[in-house]
Image: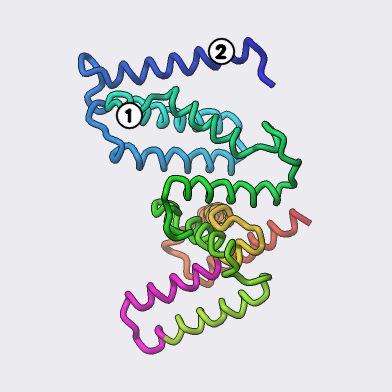
Amino acid sequence: MTTGDDESQANAGVTALLEIMARLRDPKGGCPWDLEQTFKTIAPYTIEEAYEVADAIEQNDPAAIKDELGDLLFQVVFHAQMAKEAGHFDFGDVADAISDKMIRRHPHVFADAEERTSEGQTAAWEDQKAAERAAKGEARSILDDVPVGLPALTRAVKLQKRAARVGFDWSEAAPIFDKLTEEVGELKHEMANGAAPERLEDEMGDVLFVVANLCRHLQIDPEAALRSTNAKFRRRFREIESRLEAKGTSPQEADLDEMEALWQSIKKEEHASKD
């Protein structure tokens, strides 16, 4: 629960940010770059800032999280200012809309609905979203409003979750391994027969879609898992570079066998340090 002082400070900060944004977009003396922007041109920056928040969280860096959340909030303010100028809505409308939605979707907290488990709340949340879509006359298919702009692995999981709600799903993870073996076999077959790049892309897409499904059944976020592996790869490769430099050489001068031996040594050391 926030105190009165906390709320006053937050309100003052938001007010100052809204005033800064309005000044940047002021046709008389504003920033030329900010004035040129539209919803479409700003959208990539909004996505980028969301990823930078995720990266700061991954690094477990509170100061960076605070900084990146500020950048993300600025994106919300930027969109709201452009909408205000066009007469669509303003920042207050955005805040009111999300407040109303959160209260509506949490009747077990703000109304008299029975208390739910985390799993029960997730199911009720999806039911509420489906009811809202139906009330708006949207989404003729249950898959229609899964955003196309999501990262592909995240969108795959969301599509699979929607399909699972009507029973189109495996009951457990084990059969998915058989499906993965099947899809990898089809990819190998296409490779052996000199398939065109688009055929290989199609088969690789099937493999990745099954991997996303396996992640879902194992309750693993595939994007988070891959980010973690990317960081691990970078860490280990940097260590390879350091050890080669200590020997007076470099990756460009070393052969694959030497670098692979270093990789395995580094991997073994990391595992030993965790035991």
Tell me: residue 271, above or below residue 257: above
Q: Which residues are magenta?
A: 190-211
Quadrant for residue 202, please give it. Answer: bottom left
Furthest residue in direction bottom, as rendered: 193
Location of residue 53 in the rendering, given as x and y in whole percent from the top left corner: 51, 38
Q: Quadrant of residue 169?
A: bottom right
Q: Residue furthest right?
A: 275
Q: Nearer the viewer, residue 41 or 200?
A: 41
Per the picture, the main secondary structure of the magenta-coloured stretch is: helix
Taking depth in this image into account, of 273 and 124 the one nearest to the observer is 124
Callout in the foreground (1, 2): 1
| Residues at circles 1 and 2 in contact by the CB criterion of under 8 Å | no
Q: Which residue is at a point 58% across and 40% down the rendered structure image? A: 57
Q: Which residue is mark 2?
A: 9
Q: Is residue 121 visible?
A: yes
Indicate which disc, 1 or 2, sits on the residue closer to the N terminus: 2
Q: Is residue 26 above or below residue 194?
A: above
Q: Is residue 225 within the magenta segment?
A: no
Quadrant, the N terminus: top right
The residue pinned by badge 1 equals: 88
**Label 2: few (<14), some or many (≥20) within 10 Å?**
few
In x, y percent, where is residue 90?
Answer: 38, 24
Type of amino acid at the residue the image marks with label 1: His
